[in-house]
């Protein structure tokens, strides 16, 4: 897809590649960085927010490269890593990720992904999360990739079936949580948020990283 980009967008992608090369110098080769960025552009290229693809691809590739480095022992893990996976990465997993960051005061590094990601975060989800001080304005649905699973210490699935690969030595949980995409009212989405919140609090307590 990078060959099909217009000149302005391509220039932004090339600038993003340079920034990633500076950040991961000595960890990954230029070829690896360019490959991950190109893959990320391709994976996000159908988004309705295509004007932001270079920015989102940079963020997505950066997170993937960091996960790869952690999984391969090239980048030190300084915090527990939790991955939330749902189907669209537009509701439940975004809720859970935001709540982990809030409730742990940033003591846990959290990622989220979707087995079949949507184009945008569910606006009702963004609204109810905003009610408790979690801003999802910069959140965007991302596809599930192998390296983020490998980097995680805990993998929590939410209705995505067998889409998530299984690796030994990791903690896996499956949370049966209603899908906000099927909710009929804002109150129903709030109830889903509160359900996810209670599960997040339990998980953080078990990880001994619950914020006071």
Image: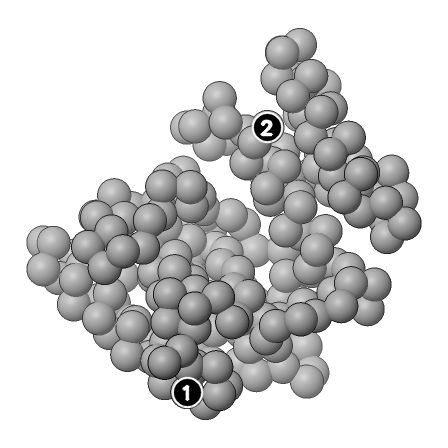
Q: Residue at x 73, y 34 (%)?
A: 19
Task: Give the colouring mode of the picture.
Answer: one colour
Helix, strand or loop for disc 2: helix
Mark 1 Cα-neighbour bin, 10 Å: few <14, some 14–19, many ≥20:
few
Which residue is nearer to you in this view: 196 or 79? Answer: 79
Using the image as rendered, state which of residue 17 and residue 156 is in the foreground.
17
Mark 2 → mark 1, Cα distance in angstroms: 38 Å
Quadrant containing the N terminus is top right
Is 59 in front, or is 148?
A: 59
The quadrant holding residue 59 is top right
At 30% from the left and 71% from the top, the residue drawn is 196
Q: Is residue 180 left or right of residue 83?
A: left
Q: In the figure, is residue 25 to the left or right of 37?
A: right
Could one spot residue 182 in this view of the protein? Answer: no
Q: Which numbered circle lies on residue 205? A: 1
**Residue 142 picture location, percent across and down:** 51, 48
Q: Position of residue 39 (x, y in %)?
A: 69, 39
Q: How many marks?
A: 2
Q: Nearer the viewer, residue 57 or 75?
A: 75
Give the vertical position of 42 relative to 148 (above or below): above
Evaluate whether residue 116 shows in this view.
yes
Numbered disc 1: secondary structure: helix
User: Is 201 located above or below residue 34 in the figure?
Assistant: below
Give the residue at mark 2. 54
x, y (%) of residue 79? 61, 72
Name the residue located 90 percent from the left edge and 49 percent from the top edge.
Answer: 26
């Amino acid at each position: 897809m990078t060959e099909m980009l217009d000149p302005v967008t391509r220039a932004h992608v090339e600038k993003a590649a340079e920034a990633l090369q500076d950040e991961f110098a000595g960890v990954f080769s230029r070829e690896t960085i360019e490959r991950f960025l190109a893959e990320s552009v391709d994976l996000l290229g159908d988004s309705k927010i295509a004007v932001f693809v270079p920015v989102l691809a940079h963020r997505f590739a950066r997170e993937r490269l960091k996960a790869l480095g952690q999984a391969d022992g090239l980048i030190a893990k300084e915090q527990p890593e939790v991955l939330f996976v749902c189907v669209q990465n537009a509701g439940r997993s975004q809720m859970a990720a935001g709540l982990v960051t809030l409730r742990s005061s940033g003591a846990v590094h959290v990622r989220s992904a979707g087995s079949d990601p949507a184009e945008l975060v569910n606006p009702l989800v963004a609204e109810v999360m905003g009610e408790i001080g979690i801003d999802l304005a910069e959140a965007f649905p991302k596809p599930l990739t192998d390296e983020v699973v490998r980097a995680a210490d805990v993998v929590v699935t939410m209705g995505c079936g067998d889409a998530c690969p299984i690796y030994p030595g990791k903690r896996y949980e499956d949370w049966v949580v209603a899908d906000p995409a099927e909710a009929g009212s804002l109150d129903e989405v709030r109830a889903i948020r509160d359900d996810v919140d209670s599960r997040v609090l339990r998980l953080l307590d078990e990880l001994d990283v619950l914020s006071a």
